[in-house]
Amino acid sequence: MKNQSFILSVGGSLLVTADGIETSFMKIFRAFILDQVKLGNKFYLVVGGGITARTYIKAGLEIAKISPADRDWIGISATRLNAQLLRASFGPAAHPEIVIDPMKKVSAKKNIVIAAGYKPGWSTDYVAVLLAKHNKIKTVINLSNIDYAYDKDPRQFKDAQRLETASWKVFRKIVGNRWQPGLNTPFDPIASREAAAAALKVVILNGSKIDNLKKCLAGEKFVGTTVS
């Protein structure tokens, strides 16, 4: 599709792993987004904290009994660090400031806008949902390191079933209703509740598979989970 606006929630796991910053992926992702912009498409890229956030939160808890709010602020700082790196990689093609308040309609002349964590209790998935609401975009595409969401954690349960489609009622039973700093789920429970209430569609797919992401954006058949 051309001349469309997309919200991509970019999981921190795509940008940083235990081995370091994924510069190879970032180069490919950057080239893909720039090509899409040439078609007239606009992107809001909401960046997660990933392993950076979890590593720092874990370290904090080993040092002292830090509060949930402080854990969240550590995670938020990780998202902003990742977001600054991604924004810098786009140079003048991107809006020069990181968006941190998703409650406002974004007025940006550039077709690449980078967003990050906002405040305690709000995951970047939740930020993505609110950006969608306030900028009248009906779909949030969640980019992570998994091909599908499952009805239970496939790392723990051999009988876990992948989901190609799911209703919000079913999906919310899977992810639950409670958010905590560093939570690792296909999509944040609070964001899921908000997206369901706003009748948004959320697509979950493997962001490292760029050709598959391209098919999703083009409205073609793709590998992933659609929740609506």
Image: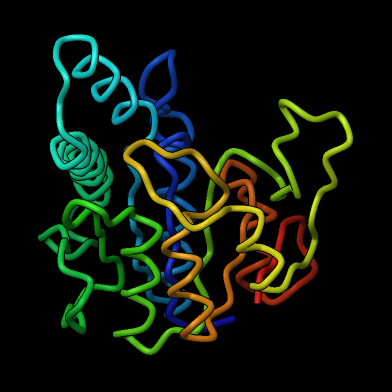
Residue that sits furthest to the top in the current view: 63
**Residue 144 found in image quarter:** top right
**Residue 93 found in image quarter:** bottom left
Protein image colouring: rainbow
Above or below: residue 65 compared with residue 83: above
Measuring 28% from the left and 57% from the top, which residue is drawn there? 122
Above or below: residue 198 compared with residue 75: below
Measuring 69% from the left and 50% from the top, which residue is drawn there? 149
Measuring 46% from the left and 29% from the top, which residue is drawn there? 24
Which is more toward the observer, 186 or 69? 69
Which is more toward the observer, 190 or 32? 190
Numbered disc total: 0
Q: Where residue 176 sits: x, y (%)?
A: 55, 54
Q: Where residue 84 sits: x, y (%)?
A: 18, 44
Q: Where residue 167 sits: x, y (%)?
A: 71, 73
Measuring 16% from the left and 42% from the top, which residue is drawn there? 69
Q: Is residue 89 left or right of residue 40?
A: left
Which is more toward the observer, 99 or 126? 126
Q: From the image, which quarter does the N terminus lie in? A: bottom right
Above or below: residue 209 compared with residue 39: above
Q: From the image, which quarter does the C terminus lie in? A: bottom right
Q: Where residue 5 sits: x, y (%)?
A: 43, 80
Residue that sits furthest to the right in the current view: 159
**Residue 208 found in image quarter:** top right
